[in-house]
Amino acid sequence: MTVRKQARRGAHIVEAAIVLPIVLLLILGIFEYCRFIFLLQVAENAAREGARYAVARTGDGTTIAQVRSHVNNAMAGRQAELAGYTVSVENVNPDTGAVITGSAWNDAPFGGAIRVRVSGTYSFIIPSLLNLPSTLPISISSMMPSEAN
């Protein structure tokens, strides 16, 4: 006597219907997380490059627009992902990081500090699907000692 397995029509479709949404959610979550971390890394690098550019050019007539342009070039187009994207260049107290009021960034003395801050609001692609906030404000800064040329 041979035992025949009964055909299980549609079992694969039911299994795929259960597993596929979970796998897609996992893949979208990984993609969104990697996109966010990549943007943070690019912004951090741009702020550092802008600060390095600014501290070496305090006395040669470099303008704040040139420093911002240098930061924008380092952002490599990723600034489009930040709503309200701004770049600020400030003369700050090297011990506290507080802005020195009434002074321009290029007034920083030797041993003083210049801070470049990149800020904006990041928007997730599919926030409701992944239970994420729709936007997330970010602010990344780099502070370096001035070379006061």
Image: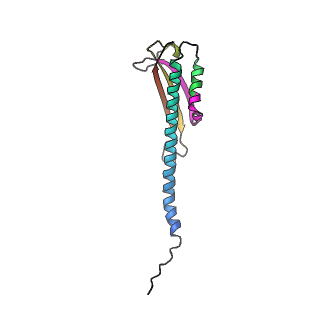
Residue 105 appears anywhere in the view: yes
Q: Does the magenta stretch include residue 115?
A: no
The residue at the point 57 percent across, 22 percent down is 67
In the rendering, at what x and y percent does residue 25 appear?
50, 52
Span highlighted in magenta in the image: 72-98
The residue at the point 47 percent across, 81 percent down is 4
Residue 104 appears anywhere in the view: no
In the rendering, at what x and y percent does residue 46 appear?
53, 29
Does 81 sit left or right of 139 as displayed?
A: right
The correct choice, above or below, for 143 with respect to 120 in the image is: above
In the rendering, at what x and y percent does residue 61 appear?
58, 13
Q: Is residue 83 magenta?
A: yes
Nearer to us in this view, 122 or 2: 2
The residue at the point 49 percent across, 60 percent down is 19
The correct choice, above or below, for 121 with respect to 126 in the image is: above
In the rendering, at what x and y percent does residue 136 appear?
50, 37
The residue at the point 46 percent across, 21 percent down is 144
- Quadrant in which the N terminus appears: bottom left
